[in-house]
């Protein structure tokens, strides 16, 4: 069964304390992996798309990487405004018209 | 910057009533999706729509649900006879092509009493 597992479930950081969020996946052939940010009561906001192992994307304090089994979202020197839930989602090969399979997310809190 | 919009932002309904949730996808996108998120749970796929027909649907998307693109801009999700367990946040998303980035709307919070 296709599965996306994110860890940790929750992460508390001090402002400036860098860390990484993990997304491991078991799907029958990965077509794409997506990272989103979700604020409470809002829709997922797109961050990155990764298509192949070894690929990396960066945006401000965030950097996403992809291997054959997992993806990491690295947060460098986070600020309180980075507090949100970070969602990982995949699209698999075979019959899928692009529907996303989501993980449960990592809730990040950054304290000043 | 173009964005997906959804109306209403909140809807309260009685069990057994019909509801229609509305979405305006990004104008040049070809694939449209509905997802739902029950409070505290993961985002779940409901249905994808392309070329005026359903491309794929999940087990959740049973006969009580239907989707429609009634004109060139709107994309709707209808729940014929709502149940308590339909209470959730419903998100519309669109993408230029399949497997490309999906952009989500702000959601409609549906509460079934």
Image (tube, coloured by chain):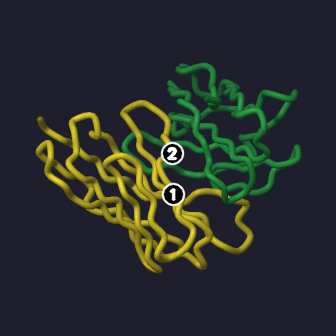
Chain colours: A yellow, B green
Q: In this view of the protein, which residue sits in the foreground, A69 or A5?
A: A69
Residue at left offset 69%, top offset 34%: B79
Give the mark, 2 or 1, whose residue is nearer the N terminus.
1
Q: Which residue is mark 1?
A: A34
Between marks 2 and 1, how big is the CA–CA gap? 8 Å
Q: Quadrant of the N terminus of chain B?
A: top right
Subunit that carries the residue with mark 1: A
Q: In this view of the protein, which residue sits in the foreground, A53 or A85?
A: A53
Residue A74 picture location, percent across and down: 30, 59
Subunit that carries the residue with mark 2: A
Q: Secondary structure at mark 2?
A: strand
Q: Residues within 10 Å of mark 1 (few under 14, many from 20)?
A: many
Share a chain, discs 2 and 1? yes
Along the horizontal axis of the image, is A24 left or right of B108?
Answer: left
Along the horizontal axis of the image, is B1 left or right of A36?
Answer: right
Residue at left offset 43%, top offset 58%: A103
Residue B74 picture location, percent across and down: 78, 28
Along the horizontal axis of the image, is B113 left or right of A73?
Answer: right
Residue B68 picture location, percent across and down: 82, 36
Q: In this view of the protein, which residue sits in the foreground, B58 or B13?
A: B58
Residues at badges 2 and 1 in contact (C-beta under 8 Å)? yes
Residue B16 picture location, percent across and down: 64, 28
Residue at left offset 27%, top offset 53%: A75
Which disc is residue A46 wearing? 2
Name above or below for residue A107 compared with residue A30. above
Q: Secondary structure at mark 1?
A: strand
Name above or below for residue B1 compared with residue A52. above
Name above or below for residue B43 compared with residue A81. below
User: How many tags in the picture?
Assistant: 2
């Amino acid at each position: 069964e296709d599965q996306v597992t994110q860890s940790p479930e929750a992460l508390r950081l001090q402002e400036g304390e860098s860390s990484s969020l993990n997304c491991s996946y078991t799907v029958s052939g990965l077509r794409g992996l997506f990272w989103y940010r979700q604020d409470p009561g809002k829709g997922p906001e797109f961050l990155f798309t990764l298509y192949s192992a070894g690929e990396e994307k960066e945006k401000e304090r965030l950097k996403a990487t992809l291997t054959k089994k997992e993806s990491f979202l690295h947060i460098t020197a986070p600020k309180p405004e980075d507090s949100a839930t970070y969602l990982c989602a995949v699209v698999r090969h075979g019959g899928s018209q692009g529907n996303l399979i989501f993980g449960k997310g990592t809730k990040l809190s950054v304290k000043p | 910057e173009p964005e997906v919009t959804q109306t209403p932002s909140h809807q309260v309904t009685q069990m057994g009533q019909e509801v229609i949730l509305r979405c305006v996808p990004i104008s040049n996108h070809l694939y449209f999706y509905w997802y739902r998120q029950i409070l505290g749970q993961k985002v779940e796929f409901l249905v994808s729509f392309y070329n005026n027909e359903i491309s794929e649907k999940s087990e959740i998307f049973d006969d009580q649900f239907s989707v429609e693109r009634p004109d060139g801009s709107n994309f709707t999700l209808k729940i014929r006879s709502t149940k308590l367990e339909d209470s959730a946040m419903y998100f519309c998303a669109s993408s230029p092509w399949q497997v490309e980035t999906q952009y989500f709307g702000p959601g409609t919070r549906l509460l079934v009493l």
